[in-house]
Amino acid sequence: MIIDCHGHYTTAPKSHDIFREAQLAAFKNPQLTVPQAAAVSDDEIRQSIESNQLKLQRQRGADLTIFSPRASAMAHHLGDEEVSKAWTRACNNLIKRVVDLYPQNFAGVCQLPQSPGVPVANSIAELRRCIEEFGFVGCNLNPDPSGGHWTAPPLIDRHWYPFYEAMAELDVPAMIHVSGSCNPNFHATGAHYINADTTAFMQFIEGDLFRDFPTLRFIIPHGGGAVPYHWGRYRGLADMLKRPPLAEHVMKNVYFDTCVYHQPGIDLLFEVINIDNILFGSEMVGAVRGIDPETGHYFDDTKRYIDHLDIPEADKRKVFEMNARRVYPRLDSILKARGL
């Protein structure tokens, strides 16, 4: 079985985006009526999925995608806490409907109603709703709700501990995933995403989070940002900071996906990072959608890169399936209930 740990609903029906535009307009102008979430039909969802994610999933050989709302549209820096709650519920409700329509192809991961300056504990209720009521298997956690200005405390700060307690209780992982950038210095997908991935890893090195929460699990997407490329730097910094070796200090709890869009990058990832810490991911339909003129294949067809690796089939199975089942135990339970 091939499980893609990183998929977003980037093709949600237009009416969903229109609701968001009206919602933000009403926030800016209190004289406007606060809109209700869009009434999206099952046929609209089917059209948006079957001609995009499901089509590519079948063409490229994946079986199931761990699916969440569009990351760049979370936009926690827009509006206020109430706006974020309403938008988040609407986004997660759509993911639930996708999963209900295509339960063999998608498993849900939730967006959180984070907002700058608001305690992350206020997001626990939505996490519980999505895990306990919807049967989702994880969440996306934004380390920078300010949208590129980094006003939130580091991930190792006790500010985050109430949420980590809920994650540990529910036994769900979080993908570290920022949203759009409102800082013109940081292009959202080309800089802000990779900055956040790298920053999160360094924060984990600096603290003792996994001593306090030994069962926490985080997926750092986009191949771990700059981390694999600078692995010696981080090993050296851990040593300078009098931290234990990374294998025991961080890598029992942190995993990287394969959203790296060229073969040399995947080769490096697999050479540097332990096979047990790598999960197959494509991010489709996501940040880079075009065809690589050097290969004639889509950049985000990441399965091809793994297929080309000269590694044992048992290791490929870990990356394609078994690691995801271990990191997402609720998904494993769903699959086992189906006899898979």
Image (spheres, grey):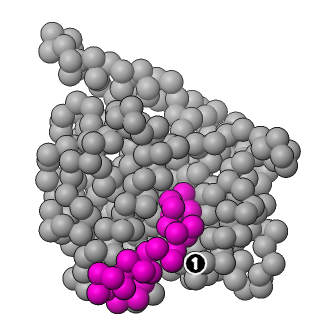
Say which residue label 1 marks: 273
Residue 55 visible somewhere in the drawing: yes
Q: Position of residue 334 (x, y in %)?
A: 51, 71
In front here: 1 or 216? Answer: 216
Q: Is residue 123 left or right of residue 258?
A: left
Magenta run includes residue 287:
no
Residue bounds of the magenta highlight? 222-246
- Residue 323 visible within the image: no
From the image, give the main secondary structure of the stretch colored magenta: helix
The percent position of residue 3, horizontal first and vertical second, equals: 62, 66
- Corner quadrant of residue 148: top left
Q: Between residues 336 and 90, which one lies in front from this camera angle?
A: 90
- Count up the numbered dots: 1
Where does residue 51 sit, x and y in percent of width and height? Answer: 70, 36
Residue 230 percent across, percent down from the top left: 52, 69
Q: Residue at x 21, y 43 (%)?
A: 115
- Tell me which residue sits at (27%, 32%) in the image: 78
- Residue sticking out furthest to the top: 31
Q: Residue at x 14, y 53 (%)?
A: 119
State whether residue 238 is above or below residue 84.
below
Residue for point 51% across, 61% down: 226
Q: Amino acid at mark 1?
A: Ile
In the rendered image, residue 245 lying in the magenta stretch gets the answer yes
Picture quarter with the C terminus: bottom right
Q: Check the picture and name the quadrant holding the N terminus.
A: bottom right
Above or below for 132 versus 152: below
Mark 1 neighbour density, 10 Å: few (under 14) some (14–19) many (20 or more) = some
Query: In terms of depth relative to the viewer, which is nearer, 231 or 326?
Result: 231
